[in-house]
Structures are given as C-alpha cells and as structure tokens.
Amino acid sequence: MKKIMTCLLIGMFLIGMAACGTKPAEKDASAQFKNSVFMGDSITEGFAFNEILPKEWVIAGAGATAGFSYDDIDAFVERKPDNVFIMLGSVDILMPVDDPKELFRNDLTKLINKIKEELPGSKIYLQSITPVTEEALKQEPRYQRIEEYNGLLEELADKLAVHYVDIGALAKESSALFAEDGIHFKKEFYQLWLKKLSESL
C-alpha cells in the first residue's frame, strides 16, 4: 500500500511539473506584439473589440481607407513601434470613384512612404484583404475584385520593399469563423491571425 501511495504521489508530482512546463508555450500570442501597431478598417478593429490586443495598439475603425488612414500615423509615431501591420482595401474597393483601384494604389503608396519617413526603424507588414462569403458577395458584387486587389498589394509590397502576409488564405481555411455578415470574423479567428503574423516576424 505504501509503495502504491508513493507511486501515486510521484505520478502527481510529475504531472504537475509537466503542466507547469507547458505554461510558457501557452503564452498569449499577443505577447510577441508588445511594441506593434495594427492599422486597418473594422476587420482589424476586431483585435480591440474582442479584447485580443490593447486598444492603444489598434489604429482602426469602420470605413477606414488608405487615404483616410494617412493622418492616423501621427497617433503612434512617438511610440516608435517595431512593427506596423497594415490591412486596408475592403473599403477602398467600394469607393465611389471612376478608378478605385488606382486610387487605392496611390493612397497606399503615399501611406507607406510616410510611415517609412516618420518611422525609419519600423518594419512594415502589408496584409492581404480577407475574402468574404458567397452570401456577402451576393449583397456586394464589388467584393469579386478582392483577389485582384491582393495582386496589387503583393506588387506594392515588392516595389516598396515591405513584407507581405497572406491573411486571406488563412481566412479561407477558417471559413467557420466568419461572423454572420460574412465579412467580419469571430473572436477565435484573431488568435489564428496573430499566430500567422508571428511566423512572419
């Protein structure tokens, strides 16, 4: 009986040690982004809304476009972030102008160049526009151009020497995590998103 109790106690001790040992590996994914800024529209805003990242790290809001975000740089220049993650385009596609794609190209180029000028030590990560569901596409056919715009984003990333990260592919793999509107995402998607970004750091 004594031997059995001893074995049980040793087993419990080892299990406890193993559990403690896994804690560092289970750190919140946000820990790697302590000195980062996330720019974008309401999709990026979900990081703050879902309390995945602190609000002060997220410079985003509904209706944001590359042009509208230009002046937002002043809000974080003093912080001198190590990384600036940009996801814009979902709203730019919908701009009521003759050539929204060319406007997006010009506005985004201007935005990235300003960040480079103001924050020469920061790394810039340009993220692809996330897809929408078939239902959302029926509601707004202009979203059919998302892949076309992502091609532009890859082109600009190469031309402006910034990093490109394909978050759209991750969204396609996680179709169950779309919100009801078929455009935004459930809270669980944001941890996957951060994990994807962490692989690009």
Image (cartoon, rainbow, N blue to C red):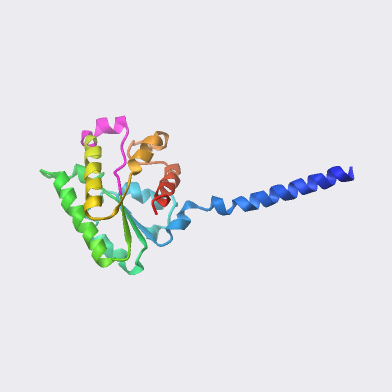
User: Where in the figure is residue 162, as x and y percent of width and height?
Assistant: 28, 55
Q: Is residue 137 highlighted in magenta?
A: yes
Can residue 188 be seen from the camera position used here? yes
Q: Nearer the viewer, residue 102 or 59?
A: 102
Q: Is residue 169 highlighted in magenta?
A: no
Give the residue at x 18% y 49%.
104
Give the residue at x 29% y 66%.
119
Give the residue at x 36% y 64%.
81
Quarter of the view holding residue 185: top left
The vertical placement of 35 against 177, above or below, is: below
User: Where in the figure is residue 39, as x and y percent of width and height?
Assistant: 31, 55
User: Where in the figure is residue 69, as x and y percent of width and height?
Assistant: 24, 56
Q: Is residue 54 left or right of residue 73?
A: right
Q: Residue furthest left?
A: 98
Q: Is residue 10 left or right of residue 122?
A: right
Region in magenta: 127-143
Quick one: quadrant of the N terminus? top right
